[in-house]
Amino acid sequence: MSSRDAQPVSPDATERATGSTHVQSVERAAALLRAVAAATGPDATAAALAGVVGLNRTTTWRILGTLERERLVSLDRETGWYSLGLGLIDLAGQAGGALARSARGVLHRLAVRTGETAALALLRDGVLTYVAQATAGAVVSAGLQDLKVSMHATSTGKALLAFSDPAELRSLLGLPRGGRLPRHTATTITSLVDLVEELAATRARGYAECRGEFETTAWGVSAPVLDASRRPMAIVSIWGPGDRITEDRFAELGAVTMASAAEIAAS
């Protein structure tokens, strides 16, 4: 048979013929994602990451650029440091059924202990959504499951914002340059400067607070379920009316909510 008669062999066919089940570029991307997850500060530059995974810098930059376009990593252009991107949280949210199921027992115990509604929220396609809830026997509450969450006007949203990459803040808020945060009640934070200060306080204490900022009748506290890289996989919240969840209960409720979030993360 002449070379003109020879048919090209596809990469897939070659892999089937040789029994190969791996794709080198995917392996390299996975290795870089793991390296980004483990790195902090100067160790998270492209040059440093290239050394960790054993790739040349050009290949590393190309792969990181692709991962950034897919929102799987995030680049701080001032420092040149990479971190995991919101796209990974979205993927976790899409596969969050198992997380929601494993969290139900924790949410039930939290609801019984506090006498309020406990809920779990996940980020899906850029939208924070409640996926599970539990109530104490005598508590009557509106259903939260499948409800979309306001990012800036709920403790759930503020917990996610506070523990996410600051470079992703505007993206998570869906806020254009010069845009103002919408007001829902008299206590809603509408200034981005004020919100950033609130998020800093949230990170310092480990949980977020809400004082009827989306609905006047809904007060609450929320804590993030963090992965090994300290990124939020989900948010645990306690909700109730302002005459029961008062400011003097925030510290107590915040502590038990953080404990429940840690229990879900460990499971």
Image (cartoon, rainbow, N blue to C red):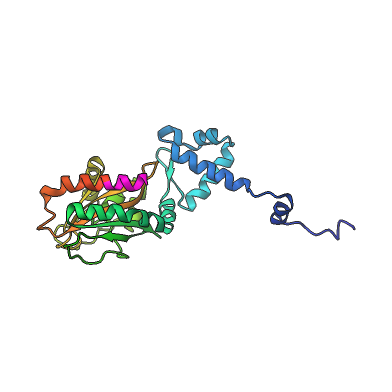
Say if residue 155 shows up in the picture.
Answer: no
Say if residue 36 shows up in the picture.
Answer: yes
Q: Main secondary structure of the magenta part?
A: helix
The residue at 29%/65% (across/down) is 147
- The total number of labels drawn is 0
Q: Is residue 200 above or below residue 140?
A: above
Looking at the rendering, in which quadrant would you find the N terminus? bottom right
Q: Front-most of 198 and 177?
A: 198
Percent coordinates x, y for residue 15 in the rendering: 70, 52
The residue at 11%/53% (across/down) is 246
The quarter of the picture where residue 77 lies is top left
- Report the side of 15 relative to 254 (left or right): right
Q: Is residue 71 above or below residue 214?
A: above
Residue farthest toward the right in the current orientation of the protein:
1
Q: In the rendered structure, which segment of residues is drawn in magenta?
A: 260-267
Percent coordinates x, y for residue 153 in the rendering: 23, 57
- Report the side of 205 relative to 39 (left or right): left
Percent coordinates x, y for residue 132 in the rendering: 31, 60
Q: Is residue 197 magenta?
A: no
- Report the side of 81 relative to 53 (left or right): left
Q: Front-most of 169 and 225?
A: 225
The residue at 22%/67% (across/down) is 142
The residue at 36%/44% (across/down) is 266
Percent coordinates x, y for residue 59 in the rendering: 59, 41
Q: Front-most of 96 and 28?
A: 96
Q: Is residue 87 above or below residue 77?
A: below
